[in-house]
Amino acid sequence: MESQATLLPIQALRWRCRRGMRELDVLVGRWLELFHPSASDSLKLEFQLLLDCEDDVIWDWMMGRSDPPLELARIVAHIRERSDQLALR
């Protein structure tokens, strides 16, 4: 990951969190709202990279069906560890 990467504004990230799969909408959208504000810049950049991936690939990572690439392992683990907090109630 390049250190020169630019953090996107929150409005752009909200739009990018709108996925083709409702379950991912919830996971990534709620993570954005609850954890993004206090996340480190490096974790925020990893989140942006995650949003570049295809829905079915992200879903497999979140379900533990496959391993994410090393540059996304931390953000995937961060979201998975907090999945109970991210669920809609």
Image (tube, helix red, strand yellow):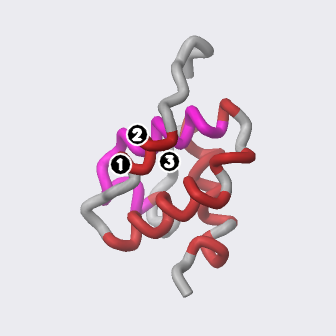
The count of marks equals: 3
Q: Identify the disc placed on residue 68.
A: 3
Magenta stretch encompasses residue 45: yes
Mark 2 and mark 3 lie on one chain; the one further toward the N terminus is: 2
Q: Identify the disc placed on residue 37.
A: none
User: Label 2 belongs to which residue?
Assistant: 12
Mark 3 vs mark 1, foreground winner is 1
Tag 3 secondary structure? loop
User: Label 1 belongs to which residue?
Assistant: 15
Q: What residue do we see at 65% from left, 39% from top?
A: 43
Q: What residue do we see at 68% from left, 47% from top?
A: 37
Q: What residue do we see at 39% from left, 64% from top?
A: 25
Q: Amino acid at mark 2?
A: Ala
Tag 1 secondary structure? helix
C-alpha distance separating marks 2 and 3: 24 Å
Q: Quick check: 41 above or below 62?
A: above
C-alpha distance separating marks 3 and 1: 23 Å
Q: Residue furthest front?
A: 11
Assess disc 3: are there few (<14), some (14-19) or many (≥20) residues with their C-alpha within 10 Å of its C-alpha: some
Q: Which residues are magenta?
A: 43-60
Q: Amino acid at mark 3?
A: Pro
